[in-house]
Image (cartoon, rainbow, N blue to C red):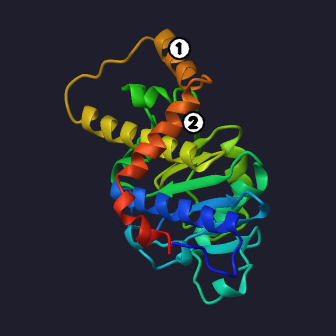
Amino acid sequence: MAKPDYMDEQEWQARCQLAALYRLIAYYKMTDLIDTHISLRLPHEPAHFLINRYGVTFEKMKASDLVKIDHDGKIVESFDEGKMVNVAGFVIHSALHHARADINCVIHTHTADGIAVSAQEQGLLPLSQHALKFYNNIAYHEYEGIAFSLEERDRLVADMGHYRCMILRNHGLLATGNHIARAFHEIYFLERACQIQVKAMSGGNLHFPKTTICEYTVQQFESPMAEPIIQAAWQAALSQIEDLQTDYCQ
């Protein structure tokens, strides 16, 4: 669909990409009714980012449902007025976008397996290749109640440190990226790692890879060769919903 006359091309393309990501999170069953959220910093307006209109389910998200807000949570454009934004979503996302210039996309989920692992004292275990992507490479943040308090932002940022992903204790998962494809890749692997852990712990004795292998594998995931794979995975995922493009890009 062609962009509306009142919007510049860069913002419209960002909205279409983010709407597609919402649809993919629904496609891979990582939704929680109308809760959880994904945000994307506008590339040509670094002080502004897009987030979902609260109340629209992810599988029905469209480019026009997204809301442009600033770091104070204020709606920027008149054409977005009247759209409701989740306060907790603003608190979590604004903290990271404001503190880290390298974070352009933030994904937050409440999946059953993600919450289950977040409630386990040992956190994410190195039980699978998916989990080794995060070996000594993930942050943790203690639960402080529903994230309405702006005071929690500093603690969240401090706990996040230099990592891209975080397990929110007794709450869910958080994944970020310098671009939308990276953030999607991170949440997909993190969610799959949690699914595997929950299944593995329901069985017999666990087998762990050697520490040297764990350290080697996470370095493989962080190598420059990972970027083209991440982009290819994003395009492959988009192909799963390509028949919906004329719908979500509205």
Residue at image x 35%, y 48%?
Answer: 113
Q: Is residue 210 visible?
A: yes
**Looking at the image, which is closer to me, 203 or 90?**
90
**Looking at the image, which is closer to me, 227 or 176?**
227
The total of numbered circles placed on residues is: 2
Image-based side of 189 in relation to 183, left or right:
left
Residue at image x 40%, y 25%?
Answer: 129
The label on residue 33 is none
* Quadrant in the rendering for residue 16: bottom right
Q: Are marks 1 and 2 in contact (CB under 8 Å)?
A: no
Residue at image x 69%, y 63%?
Answer: 10
Q: In the displayed structure, would residue 243 be above or below residue 205? A: below
For mark 1, give the secondary structure.
helix
1 or 2: mark nearer the eye: 1
Question: Residue 135, how many percent across, how many down?
Answer: 52, 26
Amino acid type, mark 2: Ile
Image-based side of 240 in relation to 169, left or right:
left
**Looking at the image, which is closer to me, 235 or 50?**
235
Q: In the displayed structure, would residue 122 be above or below residue 70? A: above
Most extreme residue toward the bottom, as rendered? 82
The label on residue 138 is 2
The label on residue 216 is 1
For mark 2, give the secondary structure.
loop
* Quadrant in the rendering for residue 223: top right
* Quadrant in the rendering for residue 248: bottom left
Question: Residue 42, how many percent across, how many down?
Answer: 71, 61
The local crowd at label 1, few if under 14, some if 14 to 19, many if 20 or more residues have their Cα within 10 Å, is: few
